[in-house]
Amino acid sequence: MELSHVISDAVLTLVGAFVFFKYLLKLELATCLLWEAFILSVTAAAFFGVIRFLGYSQAIPISEFFQHLAGTVGAFCLVLVSIYLVLSKPVEKNIAYLIIAIGFVVFAFVQFTNNLKVLQYVSMIAIPLVLLIGIFGLIKGRSAVGSWMVLAVLSLVLATYNKSFMPNTILIQLMSIIIY
């Protein structure tokens, strides 16, 4: 059992469920589908991650399935819906369905070939794109939307790579001096 992972995945599951029921169900269908492809796949991966980290190893393939779904379909949809959000335009249905279809093709490729490099490439492209879209939003005067996007990407980067660079940062060293 890995308690820290259980807690973080449980929080992510609850936040994802809250966002779904509170905000996503009110959106227009194409916009809702794009957000759901990202948020629900992340939420499902986190839910099964809780079960996985509690020690039930049979949840591992289910958690990984939803992680791959979030990293492909969800990533494609997140980039597209971010663009429309910054531009303050309604999502064009045909483009939304095309992006969802492309995402599922990439997802199927990853699932059937077990080619995890594709998953890494999609993330390496999608994350900086969302950051650039957020910066574009800031430049365009959509400061709230742009700020949230930039903050979300920075949080993701810190959460993902914190073991490799956070322990050696000056901020962490200063905090440890203050605490002790």
Image (tube, rainbow, N blue to C red):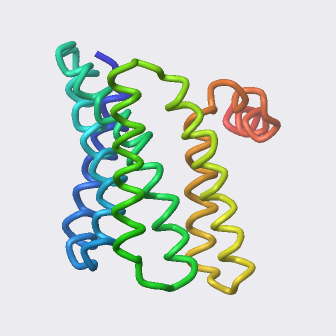
Tell me what residue is drawn at x 52 percent, y 30 percent.
Answer: 118
The quadrant holding residue 158 is: top right
Q: Quadrant of the C terminus?
A: top right
Residue 121 locus on image (x, y percent): 59, 34
Spot the residue most to the right: 170
Of the 4 image quadrants, the one containing the N terminus is: top left
User: What is the total number of numbered labels drawn onto the structure image?
Assistant: 0
| Residue 152 lies in quadrant | bottom right
Above or below 62: residue 174: below
Query: At x 36% / y 34%, what residue is drawn?
Result: 67
- 58 left or right of 163 in image: left
99 relative to 136 in the view: left or right: left
Q: Nearer the viewer, residue 63 or 91?
A: 91
Image: 54 above or below 37: above
Image location (x, y in percent) of residue 176: 71, 32
Corner quadrant of residue 135: bottom right
The structure residue drawn at horizontal position 58% and vertical position 49%, both measured from the top left corner, is 126
| Foreground residue among 95 and 91 | 95
Q: In the displayed structure, does residue 62 sit left or right of residue 128?
A: left
Is residue 11 depicted above or below 4 in this figure? below
Residue 77 placement (x, y as % from top left):
42, 57
Residue at the image position 20 percent from the left and 21 percent from the top: 59
Q: Is residue 79 above or below residue 66?
A: below
